Image (cartoon, rainbow, N blue to C red):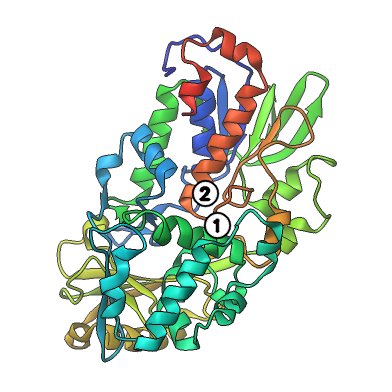
Amino acid sequence: MAGTGTPALGPRVAVIGGGLAGITAALGCADARCPVTLFESRSWLGGLTYSFSRDGLWVDNGQHVFLRCCTRYRALLARLGVENDVHLQRRLDIPVHDADTAGRLRRLPLPAPLHLGWALLRYPWLSAADRARFVRAALALRAVDVTDPRTDTVSFGDWLRAHGQRRATIDSLWDLVGIATLNAHADDASLALAATVFQIGLLTRADAADIGWSRIPLRRLHGDAARSALTAAGATVRTGAKVTALERTPTGWTVVADGIATEVDAVVLAVPHEAAAALLPAGAVDLPPDWAAALGHSPIVNVHVVYDRPVLPEPFRAGVGTAAQWVFDRTPASGLDDGQYLAISVSAADEFIDRPTAELRERFLPALHRLLPAARAARVREFFVTRERHATFRPAPGTARLRPGPRTALPGLYLAGAWTDTGWPATMEGAVRSGESAAAHLVSDVPAISDNSSTPISEVFR
């Protein structure tokens, strides 16, 4: 791997965007000995995975988790030297509750899909007939061809109903997993993306869905660690530098940030899709003129509650039949040493994104108290809300045609971001994969790098 003081032998590269996709692309190019400048408009790296300080606590903008099957994201953590700052379950274990009933989705040490058999037999929200229908649908979903363009045109909800799934089964099981990973309800999600999630996460490898999360604030896990790693790799990091123009020149590209022009040989555009659409030169992508608007956005709301005492005995709990979809204990990562800090993560949050905080308090505190009986006697010290209006693209049927690959039609210009054609929904894993792909394509388009670098390109992007 290249590091500080190693001669740069590749083309000059600008990476626009300091989220996980941009961080990954910049590291990939720097490790291939390209002189890299990363431009980020905010004052920190990490994109939509960031933290801020509030009343002495570290607050993540949202609860981000990953699965064991997120191999490229986990490789990025290792590259950043923070793999020991996350926790990964030894075995999938999801406590699930409603106001009156408790259940658990815990896997057994058996091959998939038998690993969840015992959990399904004891899952209290399904009848015996529902369980049998669920198994038949899961086996059918395992056989869905996610690469067939026709699959992307079908709604996951329509497919589930066609395979005998009742509303109660969809709400208590399919959407329990699907909403959190797709940021969409089954009726609003592409079958191709939903099938990808369930095939990779639950139906192929028994350990694939083991859940991981950060032990430290996301700012430290991603942003601070990335800045250190990029600097050590010889890259230049420019935060607070908003790129306003991207222009092709006879010899390469000009990137204009805050009125300052930088000449480079290649560019990785790793910004959200609406920002990419505004910067892309004409003819760069073969997409409809309104492609970015058609791809759309799906919001996420996080409700933060600090209690004067512990009320949640587990690291997290999932809810059925409640607005409080997933509740996480944020106490250790926040630095709180007295009481308990909980975060309710609400995906596909169109219903809540524009509601005032007072109204959300009236809605979510009773829901939380039904889900956590111990919270009823506790005092609420703080209640606040974080909102990501543009958290992900909207994974509706037909979106595959709106997700371009890493190469554009213009030489030296590449795309990265969870919204690009990664084969995954908009997840941290998808973002990292897009960054790796953009860097790999850029490097492969410059044969001289392979000739001169002491580190084979096949090893850099292995």
* Earlier residue among tags 1 and 2: 1
Q: Quadrant of residue 438?
A: top right
Q: Quadrant of residue 391?
A: bottom right
Q: Is residue 79 above or below residue 95?
A: above
Which amino acid is tagged 1? Pro
Measured as percent of width and height from the top left, residue 369 is found at: 27, 86
Measured as percent of width and height from the top left, residue 251 is found at: 78, 18
Is residue 371 toward the left or the right of residue 192 in the image? left
Q: How many marks?
A: 2
The numbered dot on residue 79 is none
| Rendered residue at 21%/88% (across/down) | 376
> Which residue was labeled with disc 2?
430
Circles 1 and 2: CB distance less than 8 Å? yes
Q: Is residue 287 above or below residue 119?
A: above
Which amino acid is tagged 2? Gly
Mark 2 Cα shell of 10 Å, populated few (<14), some (14-19), many (≥20):
many
Mark 1 Cα shell of 10 Å, populated few (<14), some (14-19), many (≥20):
many
Measured as percent of width and height from the top left, residue 54 is found at: 34, 61
Q: Is residue 129 above or below residue 219?
A: below
| Rendered residue at 66%/70% (across/down) | 154
User: Does the rendering let one see residue 143?
Assistant: yes
> Which residue was labeled with disc 1?
425
Real-space CA distance between mark 1 and mark 2, rounded to the nearest whole angstrom: 7 Å
| Rendered residue at 34%/44% (across/down) | 220
| Rendered residue at 72%/27% (across/down) | 412
* Residue placed most toward the observer, 260 or 81: 81
Q: Secondary structure at mark 2?
A: helix
